[in-house]
Amino acid sequence: MTRANRIRTVLLGTVAAVLLAAPVTAQTVVAEKGKEANMVLLPKFLGILPFDQANKGAEEAHAELENPGKLLYTGPTPENSVAGQIEIMTTSASQGQNAVMLSNNAGEQIVPAAKAAMDAGTTVVTWDSPIGSAEGEQVFVAQVDFSDIGTVMADMALSILDGEGKMAVLSATPDAANQNAWIAAMNEALKDEKYSGIELVDTVYGDDQSEKSYSRALALVDKHPDLGLIMSPTSVGIVAAAKAMQDEGLCDEVKVSGLGVPAEMVSYTMNDCAPEFALWDFVDLGYLTYYVSYLIATDQMEGVEGDSFTAGRMGDYTIEKDPTRDAGRRVLMGPFTVYNKDNVEAASK
């Protein structure tokens, strides 16, 4: 072998070794339309505007993907949310539904039914509110990073209270994994020195029922006469609290903030009962959740960490380890918007 040939052989071997050692880049999955999958969108319960908006997004994706299967939007009543979700999950599996898209309001109580559904071949994707342990779900579609929500709520409290005052939390239910995570993230954020003037004095639950949330808000004011802010990370609670403060003529003394829908909050923001609040797009959340569930249920994507896919008009996403839970995987949607007098009217139309 000549010297030139030896050099060429060495170079070719080196290039081959580099190529073999290089990581293989996973292809981005683009959905094949027309695959049949019967799918269930299961909110915490029926009768709440954000969940109806999520269903609108799911319906958009269902039509776009030309799925000949059925999309069922069903849920329990607010009074029977935990048992109702478990029953619907169990029924969906026994009826051979291909996918259940769950906004979990049953905490870990949903796990046996969700695991049984997966064992029966049903894809279980959570959205809005995950299963804390991640048992019984394949992936969680997160609206935003939960730790970011905590910081945003702390920042809104800082702004509304002008750096100093007492705040209470009006949440949904004690088993709502999403709200519990957001409250925990806010508590962690409040440890920062810049929030030292803000005191969190109480956390109560209105079970995402308007009348109960209304009365819980008034009870907070009675219990804490020097309360300056009610922070409600739920679209039902924030409206109920703002209405309670408005009805009692307390908007100058006790402000309201949290997570709400612009169309429901516009009047309370413009009259300064709720100067600031935040939210993300629930139509997009339903749309993205449908894409994830469809791809897994029709065997076009495994649903494991590292899987990349295109979700129609929303673009490309990758399944990642969920950093907010010890176990589990997530697809992170983002972003969210803080609403005030400058933008709430336009967003409410």
Image: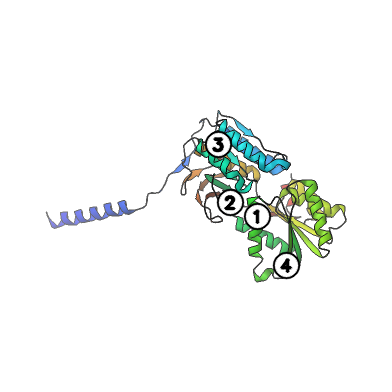
N-term-proximal mark, 4 vs 1: 1
Q: Which residue is mark 1?
A: 180
Q: Residues within 10 Å of mark 2 (few under 14, many from 20)?
A: many
Determine the secondary structure under disc 1: helix
Q: Are marks 2 and 4 in contact (CB under 8 Å)?
A: no
Q: Position of residue 301 (x, y in %)?
A: 47, 40
N-term-proximal mark, 3 vs 2: 3
N-term-proximal mark, 3 vs 4: 3
Which mark, by number, is residue 99?
Answer: 3
Task: Specify the amino acid type for callout 2.
Answer: Gly
Q: CA distance from mark 2 to mark 4?
A: 29 Å
Q: Are marks 3 and 4 in contact (CB under 8 Å)?
A: no
Determine the secondary structure under disc 4: strand
Q: Nearer the viewer, mark 3 or mark 2?
A: 2
Which mark, by number, is residue 198?
Answer: 4
Determine the secondary structure under disc 3: strand
Q: Residues within 10 Å of mark 1 (few under 14, many from 20)?
A: some
Q: Position of residue 311 (x, y in %)?
A: 54, 42
Structure colour scheme: rainbow
Rendered-image quadrant of the N terminus:
bottom left
N-term-proximal mark, 2 vs 4: 2
- Picture layout, residue 187 above or below residue 282: below
N-term-proximal mark, 3 vs 1: 3
Q: Which residue is mark 2?
A: 132
N-term-proximal mark, 2 vs 1: 2
